[in-house]
Image: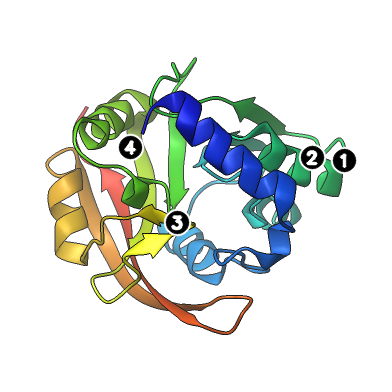
Amino acid sequence: MPTSDRFQHWDSVYRTRESAAVSWFQAEPAVTLALVELLEIPHDAAIIDVGGGASRLVDHLLAADYTDLTVLDLSPAALAVSQIRLGDAAGVEWIAEDLLTWQPAHRYDLWHDRAVLHFLSGEAVATYRELLERSVAPGGCVILGTFAPDGPEQCSGLPVTRYSAADLVHFLAPTFAVIEERHELHTTPSGSMQAFTWVAASRVSR
């Protein structure tokens, strides 16, 4: 999907729907927070949440005293949800850009992605993987959450690619070594269940 079409799709979602009503909404990102603790991410680490526009993850990281936070999203409307909710929260950089064309100004100690990768296909997956190489600092970590093989085949009217833990291990190798795998059953606001695969990995090569 071209950038302009992706922008129109996701910006429309957040302009026409309540952020707490979309299927991927989580009041508390429990799996992510557990993996952040498992990885022993320092409180001054540079953390980026890609596709995290309206996510509550940034709220929880601020509450846990993390001080160097970046949230990137294609949709300015999604980012505005969090900016209005948090006000002028210290330590948060908001970036409204297409991840696939974004040029990071520096490297990050933790890259977090819940449900961006699984929307990508073909060359876009290779672009994403190359961006990881450029964006994650030596010794840095990655947390990825995607739909699992027993998860939905579509989300928000778009097709997705479902990943097993083994698929994500293969995707991240050899630069990143997976150190934790998890399977999550996410309950949507409407009460349906969605299966997610999660991995936490550390960078083992430059």
User: Would you name the residue on which mark 2 appears?
Assistant: 83
Q: Amino acid at mark 2?
A: Gln
Q: SS class of the residue under badge 2? A: helix
* First reached walking from the N terminus: tag 3 or tag 2: 2
Task: Please provide percent x and percent y for residue 193.
Answer: 46, 82
User: Would you name the residue on which mark 4 appears?
Assistant: 139
Left or right of 174 on screen, residue 176: right
Q: Looking at the image, which residue is at 76% across and 45% down?
A: 81
User: Would you name the residue on which mark 1 appears?
Assistant: 87
Q: SS class of the residue under badge 1? A: loop
Q: Looking at the image, which residue is at 30% across and 33% down?
A: 128
Question: Which labelled disc corresponds to residue 157?
Answer: 3
**Name of the residue lying farthest toward the bottom:** 191
Q: Amino acid at mark 1?
A: Gly
Colouring used for the render: rainbow
Query: Is 26 rendered above or below residue 175?
Result: below
* First reached walking from the N terminus: tag 2 or tag 4: 2
